[in-house]
Image: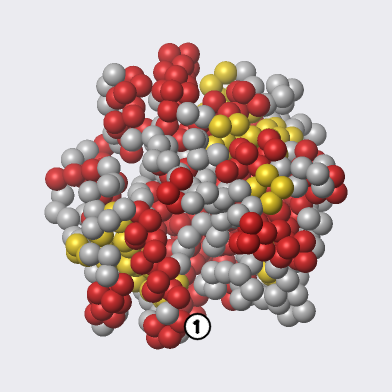
Amino acid sequence: MVQSAKYVSTRGADANEPKSFCDILLAGLATDGGLYVPQAYPSLTTDELAEMRMLSYPALACNIISRFVDDIAAEDLRNIINKTYREEVFGSAEITPLANLAPGLHLLKCSNGPTLAFKDVAMQWLGHLFEYVLARDELELNILGATSGDTGSAAEHAMKSKQGVRVFMLSPKGKLSPFQAAQMFSIQDTNIHNFAVEGVFDDCQDMVKAVSNDLSFKAQYRIGAVNSINWGRIVAQVVYYFKAYFAATTNNSEKVSFSVPSGNFGNVLAGHVARMMGLPIRQLIVATNENDVLDEFFHTGVYRPRQSSDTQHTSSPSMDISKASNFERFLFDLAWRDPAVVRELMQKVDSEGGFDLSACDQLWGRVPAFGFVSAKSTHQDRLATIRMVHQKYGVDIDPHTADGIKAGLQRHDGSVPLICLETALPAKFEATMAEALGHNPPRPEKYIGIEALPQRFVVLTTSVDKLKEVIAKGCQF
Ligand SMILES: *Cc1c(COP(=O)(O)O)cnc(C)c1O
């Protein structure tokens, strides 16, 4: 338990009365619309970093996460972490093993959890953490969310059978891949409620927003979220940047660069946090697909969220975003942690649709010092990269990971090892894999035939009243 780990909003709320970890864990956005960030990043001494090199994954997770948690007893926190990061859940004791592709080129395998995407690494811990906190504080939580695939299934597999938690998950009917639909709809636990909505993903998201904006309903039914701004998810993701660094180097005077397939900027933000703590990272390469809000910013200084109608559906669908929710946390650091600057910039997003930092040397001039660079990739790039990695290294990568490798090879400066994050397994995206390689990717054994399992879901129209009705009913059990 670290007494100094307290949280403030990027827009200034709570600056005089910083919050504890468990307060912000279930809070979502701060009251002023900002995101919670640590009052200060924990900073590691050379000795501390040296000691970490020897640690197992759960011990490393404990060492790092405990620096961000001020209100869970040390022994309880260790138990929660040990329950989460087990070989039976992640396929190996290393949890996120590093595979070497070529001298100086590595793949960090983050996708061997229950739903075959990196989101499991954070979501599994959130499941155990929520169960603990809710029992301790005698609370219940109803998680409401919308998903186009990966987030929903990671959340459901983390929360199923957990005491005190229910999940209500909306997905666009008929728009998920058969594999993704089976992963969610075949869950039989009664605390998991799947709704197939007759509409597109944006309709699902609008319904979730409408319910969350009904503050009395939200309070009465204790509605919460596990979206990518959840700080609990970010801290868990910080851990594998350390793990990868130690696996790729032999001593702490070396540096590495990371390339990260990015959407809401949660994963690469965790890399930024690791770097701010003192992990020797040279570059953080932000990889986007055709939805290039982030690539545009890192190239031009212009941040311009898109309309959802301008958001393309691509073959790396989990990166199809119109705005990068976690970007504000980086902006806060870039702006010398001055909430007044963040407020002004985010106001511009609301009133003018975006902002341009290119003429502001005080801010834009600092970006290189944080190690951020970016590149974007297209459908053709993904196919070519999947083929290249298959032929040259004998490894199959999924379309999102391909975006990351493409950007990494394009942008890294070559002087230090490059670590590319694998964010999903190819088995989740059969159609694109078959287009690239001419055959379906191999499926891990326990997922063979999951499309044939009995499925539990309720079909809904886009009626918000009806959604509220089924949530209220679901809460009776
Ligand atoms: C969620 C996801 C991403 C994007 O991660 P962010 O944290 O939103 O940047 C990339 N790839 C896959 C496979 C994902 O599921």
**Residue 292 seen in the figure:** yes
Q: Residue at x 36, y 50 (%)?
A: 148
Q: Is the image coloured rainbow, by chain, by secondary structure, or in one colour?
A: secondary structure
**Residue found at the far right of this picture:** 362
> Can residue 386 be seen here?
no
Q: Is residue 465 above or below residue 104?
A: below
Q: Quadrant of residue 179?
A: top left
Residue at horizontal 57 percent and vertical 50 percent from the top: 305
| Nearest to the observer: residue 310 or residue 256 | 310
Residue pointed to by mark 1? 137
274 relative to 72 in the view: left or right: right
Name the residue: 64% across, 34% down. Answer: 374
Determine whether the residue tagged by mark 1 lies in a helix, strand or loop.
loop
Q: Is residue 168 left or right of residue 136?
A: left
User: Residue 270 versus residue 220: which sits nearer the camera?
Assistant: 220
Q: Position of residue 91 (x, y in %)?
A: 40, 42
Q: Quadrant of the N terminus?
A: bottom right
Sort mark 1 into few (<14), some (14-19) or many (20+) by Cα contacts within 10 Å: few
User: Residue 318 at what x, y percent from top left?
Assistant: 43, 44
Q: Look at the picture and state if 175 lies above or below 207.
A: above
